[in-house]
Amino acid sequence: MRKEASTENLTYRELYNEGNSALSMALEEEREAQLDARLLLEHVCGTSLQTLLLDGERAVTDNEAELYRRLLKRRCSREPLAYILGKWDFMGLEFGVSSDVLIPEQDTENLVEEVMREVCDGDRILDLCTGSGCILLSLLNYSNGSTGVGTDLSEGAIAVAKENALKLGLSERCDWKAGDLFEAVDPGEKFDIIVSNPPYIRSETIGELAPEVRIHEPRMALDGGDDGLYFYKRIIPEAADYLRTGGMLFLEIGYDQAEQVGALMKDAGYYEVRTIKDYGGNDRIVCGIKSIHQE
């Protein structure tokens, strides 16, 4: 970061410019630097975009400037903006996030939207590798009378999901259980829909990811084993024991995994197996229906 200006008579716009200059040197994209500098300032000062546009000459306090500079240093170290803010938007809802969970991404909104096409009022939903709970809670929020269970191996993630459920007023409609996939589910429990965004990145490629992901996001939520398919190979056959006949399994996948994951589902006996693309045109979701022959 460049030498900090005195906070005496420092204006809102000057502090923003200081942040933009620092982040422009630390981040790869200028637009990202501009956006993050503004969002951090709005977070510190409790302001909005209109403040920079219409009231940029307002004075900032010493405390505001000090806190802003502390948060800038964290972002310059490539800590994700969402972790610094402690929250992120997903499906029009605000979710609390921490380093115990992946940051909700737009690609996963595609998954939620596809599941929403199939959810009926009163359905029972299981969300494996739930993380922040953003998938299950979005589905419950936008459906009537549906209930669900979210499981995750991370106790920290379960704590985040519970807090999000409480903030969204959905605690009475969901349960959160720590455990390894279906081991956390009550034996014999059946669901109309099972959905998961499991770890699917090949172990050897994690080191190639951006620092925000590689260093700061939880590796256990990223690492899909040597071939990236470890969790699909477990979830797909086991899910049949927890789905009602005619129930659906939805899985988020990596852009190059559709053929392999689809084959795993067909081999396990699911029918009408199909692949759905995301907004960028990449294969992103594989889904299928439980057959009576899987009983």
Image (tube, rainbow, N blue to C red):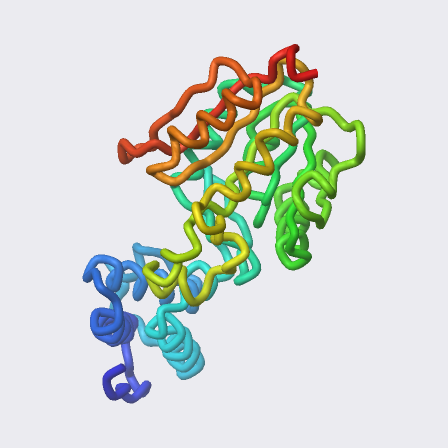
> What residue is at 64 percent from the left and 59 percent from the top?
156
**In the figure, is residue 79 to the left or right of 86?**
left
Placement of the C terminus among the 4 image quadrants: top right
Quadrant in which residue 291 is drawn: top right
Residue 177: percent from left, percent from top: 73, 46
| Number of numbered discs visible in the structure rendering | 0
Indicate left or right for 211 with 238 as reference.
Answer: left
Q: Position of residue 274 (x, y in %)?
A: 42, 20
Name the residue nearer the viewer: 52 or 231: 231
- Measured along the vertical axis of the image, is residue 109 above or below residue 286? below
Closest to the observer: 191 or 43? 191
Percent x, y of residue 27: 25, 67
Q: Residue at x 55, y 54 (%)?
A: 96
**Foreground: 63 or 26?**
26
Residue 58 at x, y percent in the picture = 30, 71
Front residue (pair 279, 202)? 202
Q: Which quarter of the rendered picture does the N terminus lie within? A: bottom left
Q: Quadrant of residue 286?
A: top left
Extreme top residue here? 292
Q: Could you say which quadrant of the image residue 49 lies in?
A: bottom left
Left or right: 24, with 211 as reference point: left
For image coordinates 69% across by 38% down, the residue present is 182
Instruction: Decide: is 108 above or below 60.
Output: above
> Which residue of the protein is positioned furthest toward the left in this rendering?
30
Residue 208 appears left or right of 149: left
